[in-house]
Image: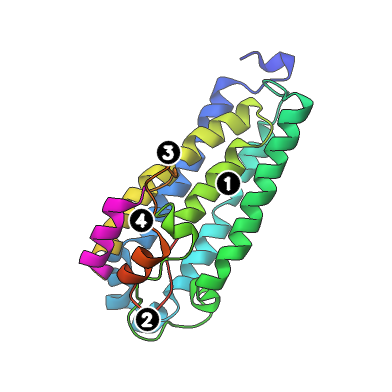
Amino acid sequence: MNASAGHPGVPLLAALAAAWIAWGALHSLLAGARAKAWVAARWPRLAARERLLYNAIALATLAGPLALLSAAAGPALWTMPGLLAWVADAAAIAALAGFLWTLRWYDGRAFLGLRTPSGATGLVISPLHRWVRHPWYSLALVLVWTREMDAAWLVSALVLTLYLVVGSRHEESGLLREHGEAYREYASRVPALLPWRGCALDAEAAARLAQPAGRSRA
């Protein structure tokens, strides 16, 4: 790209991609069972606040990618026609509404790390979970791909999409350990990120697979 024409140079875009990859790798590493066990073995008191610390680190380390994203901002690669722009904005608003709506199926204080969950977390299948196994990731993809695309945002969108796909696969192993055969059957019937006609649970099947205790996962 020609940086003199207002577009960021390749080195800056490469740095942006590397920053997003590093952020995603750290995010996944800290969310893993090994990292949690390592913290619990060395700092038992800190382990009780592991979720709060995890969220704080995830937010703090966003500063690097976001600063590079701002520095690499440039002219749009293409523009959406009027009607398509309205559709894109409507999809983004619907995705944000979906985030807020699904909060009712989560223990918000435990998710933020403001309290320690009591007992084992069970499998609860919300209405969106009947269509995709990771609805928050799916909604995030809608937000990412409905924004105006300059070179920096396109690089960010590609890397974040890869992260969400890989992250959902990584999360599956933990969910299988936690929920066992119920989650295995659920995963065999519901797609991970993209809803497909005919690949959804009806209310009766969701109720049969659900475990009453706990809250659903993203």
Residues under numbered marks 2 and 1 in contact, where contact means CB atoms less than 8 Å apart: no
Closer to the camera, 151 or 78? Answer: 78
Q: CA distance from mark 4 to mark 3?
A: 16 Å
Closer to the camera: disc 1 or disc 3? 3
Magenta stretch encompasses residue 217: no
Give the residue number, with chain letter if any, for mark 3.
162
Three-letter amino acid code at disc 1? Gly
In the rendered structure, which disc, 3 or 2, sits on the residue that comes first in sequence?
Answer: 3
Three-letter amino acid code at disc 4? Leu
**Residue at the limit of the structure toward the right, as seen here:** 82
Residues under numbered marks 3 and 2 in contact, where contact means CB atoms less than 8 Å apart: no
Three-letter amino acid code at disc 3? Leu
Q: Residue at x 49, y 83 (%)?
A: 115
Quadrant of residue 99 within the rendered picture: bottom right
Closer to the camera: disc 4 or disc 3? 3
Residue 16 visible, this orientation: no
Q: CA distance from mark 4 to mark 1?
A: 18 Å
Magenta stretch encompasses residue 182: yes
Magenta stretch, residue numbers: 179-191
Q: CA distance from mark 4 to mark 2?
A: 27 Å
Three-letter amino acid code at disc 2? Ala
In the rendered structure, which disc, 4 or 1, sits on the residue that comes first in sequence?
Answer: 4
In the rendered structure, which disc, 4 or 2, sits on the residue that comes first in sequence?
Answer: 4
Q: Residue at x 57, y 51 (%)?
A: 62
Q: Main secondary structure of the magenta part?
A: helix
Give the residue number, with chain letter if any, for mark 2.
213
Kindly identify which numbered label has been placed on residue 29: 4
Give the residue number, with chain letter if any, for mark 1.
64
